[in-house]
Amino acid sequence: MNLAIFAAVTAAVFCIGDAVMIPMVMRPLFKSALGAAMLDELRLGPAALFYFIHIAGLVHFAGRPFVRGGDARGAFLNGAVLGLVSYSCYEMTSWTIMRDWQTGLVVIDMAWGTLISGTAAWAGAIAMGTLRSRRPLLPPT
């Protein structure tokens, strides 16, 4: 049950973040760099498969250690590292083999993947810890 809460909140934060970032920042950025190489419509199947695999990785590498006694900062760090690894695989491969791939695409997308993955894992840990202990994990302000 604990990992289910972690997974649900992590997935929601990750998907909401991408739902804002992709149309407002990433798609226009990639469109300006790649032009006609971009599809007019997103392919939802591969996107859904990436989200499933990536969220499963966040649950395994950030959620499981948190359940075993970690803190929300550790979940953030583990999630951020996984985001950096995942997004850098895509970006570095694309930069290596694609003619019009640009340094700016690499930097921005890797930074976004790192930030959203860490933030989503952190939010999942906060929600799970709050429900588990019936008190918030964050200190009062």
Image: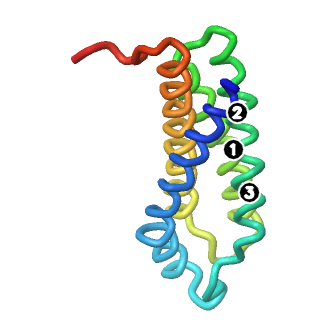
Q: Relative to residue 9, is residue 74 depicted above or below? A: above
Q: Relative to residue 134, is residue 126 depicted above or below? A: below
* Residue 12 spot, x, y in % from top left: 55, 48
Whichever of labels 3 and 1 marks the residue nearer the N terminus, that label is: 3
Tell me the kind of residue under disc 1: Ile
Tag 3 residue = 50
Q: Quadrant of the C terminus?
A: top left
Tag 1 residue = 55
Q: How far apart are labels 1 and 2 at the CA level?
A: 6 Å
Provide the secondary structure element on which disc 1 rests. Answer: helix
* Residue 111 spot, x, y in % from top left: 51, 48
Disc 3 packing (10 Å; few <14; some 14–19; many ≥20): few
The image quadrant that residue 46 belongs to is bottom right
118 or 67, which is in the foreground? 67
* Residue 10 spot, x, y in % from top left: 58, 40
Q: How far apart are labels 2 and 3 at the CA level?
A: 14 Å
Whichever of labels 2 and 3 marks the residue nearer the N terminus, that label is: 3
Tell me the kind of residue under disc 2: Val
Q: How far apart are labels 3 and 1 at the CA level?
A: 8 Å
Residue furthest out toward the top:
69
Give me the residue at 47% from left, 72% from top: 23
Q: Tell which tag, 2 or 3, sits nearer the viewer.
A: 2
Mark 3 in CB contact with mark 1 (< 8 angstroms):
no
